[in-house]
């Protein structure tokens, strides 16, 4: 395949494990795409700052979509779609009332209702965030409505007896209607994305910006929040460890990310022209 491609890759569970480990062959395949003139994006639910740090380590020249599509890097400009302050205030109140951990993300700041977990401190454990302590702000019920820089968020249930997240999703839908898109990347969380700012929207924005159609767009993912991205790409690929619903939404299923699924697909489909 010689025409220019747009290649969009989810991060956690698609390229990388919880220890921030990415296989050398995966890095090599993505770097080869960039060297060959293709456009390669990291499309992640992580905040934009985290995505930038990791993209530089994965493949120099890789650009970033952060916050599940809420922040889109287009060359030297960055597009942002912020969450309404009224929604921020309502989510904060719900978090305290139900004893759930709420995390809201700007491009670099983290707003939280519970005690900051260890993984949000600097580059500890399995997260990469700003080393500046001023970038961590605890939300109070009184001040939440004044926060206007939130891009996306996540509710996490760390209780010993977890609440019914299905019921909670129904409650959130009743509260916010079509103002928020809801998805999950793990069994105990609910991703909170402003309407019109999901990964699929981001991919379509990139297609328009670069003049690359869906037929020449490849997307890789493993979670529910990747489904819209796979749908926007003509070549939607689920890694082998993806959830069943994601595999059903994909055009192709490649190997598990621990077995180099993304690299294997790129090497066969792009560089050898073989459908897998």
Image: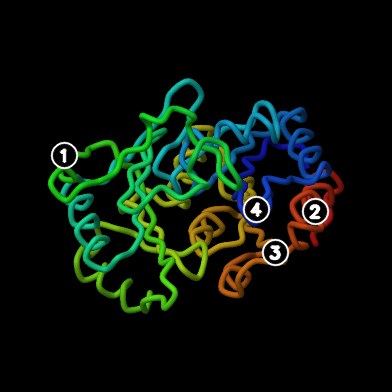
Give the residue at x 68% y 49%: 19
Q: Earlier in the sequence, mark 3 or mark 1?
A: 1
Tag 1 secondary structure: helix
Q: Nearer the viewer, mark 3 or mark 4?
A: 4
Q: Which residue is mark 2?
A: 260
Residue lying at the far right of the rendered structure? 272
Q: Which residue is mark 1?
A: 146
Q: Which labelled disc corresponds to residue 18?
A: 4
Q: Earlier in the sequence, mark 2 or mark 4?
A: 4
Q: Position of residue 158 (x, y in %)?
A: 44, 66
Q: Earlier in the sequence, mark 2 or mark 1?
A: 1
- Indicate the quadrant containing the C terminus: top left, top right, bottom left or bottom right: bottom right
Q: Are marks 3 and 1 in contact (CB under 8 Å)?
A: no
Where disc 3 sits, the SS reads: strand
Measure the C-alpha gap from mark 2 to mark 4: 15 Å
- Residue located at (41% from left, 59% from top): 191
């Amino acid at each position: 395949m010689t025409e220019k491609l747009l290649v969009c890759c989810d991060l956690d569970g698609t390229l990388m494990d919880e220890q921030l480990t990415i296989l050398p062959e995966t890095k090599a395949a993505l770097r080869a795409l960039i060297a060959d003139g293709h456009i390669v994006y990291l499309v992640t639910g992580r905040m934009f700052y985290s995505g930038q740090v990791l993209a530089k380590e994965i493949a120099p020249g890789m650009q970033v979509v952060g916050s599940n599509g809420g922040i889109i890097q287009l060359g030297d400009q960055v597009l942002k779609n912020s969450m309404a302050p009224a929604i921020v205030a309502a989510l904060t109140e719900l978090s305290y009332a139900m004893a759930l951990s709420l995390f809201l993300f700007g491009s670099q700041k983290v707003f939280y209702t519970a005690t900051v977990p260890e993984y949000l401190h600097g580059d500890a454990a399995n997260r990469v965030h700003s080393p500046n302590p001023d970038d961590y702000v605890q939300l109070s019920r009184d001040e939440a409505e004044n926060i206007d820089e939130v891009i996306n968020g996540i509710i996490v249930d760390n209780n010993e007896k977890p609440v019914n997240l299905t019921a909670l999703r129904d409650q959130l839908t009743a509260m916010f209607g079509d103002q928020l898109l809801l998805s999950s990347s793990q069994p105990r969380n609910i991703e909170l994305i402003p309407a019109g700012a999901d990964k699929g929207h981001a991919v379509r924005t990139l297609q328009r910006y670069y003049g690359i159609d869906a037929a020449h767009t490849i997307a890789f993912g493993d979670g529910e929040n990747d489904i819209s991205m796979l749908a926007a790409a003509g070549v939607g690929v689920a890694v082998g460890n993806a959830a069943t619903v994601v595999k059903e939404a994909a055009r192709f299923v490649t190997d598990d990310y621990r077995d180099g699924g993304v690299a294997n697909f790129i090497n066969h489909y792009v560089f050898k022209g073989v459908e897998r």
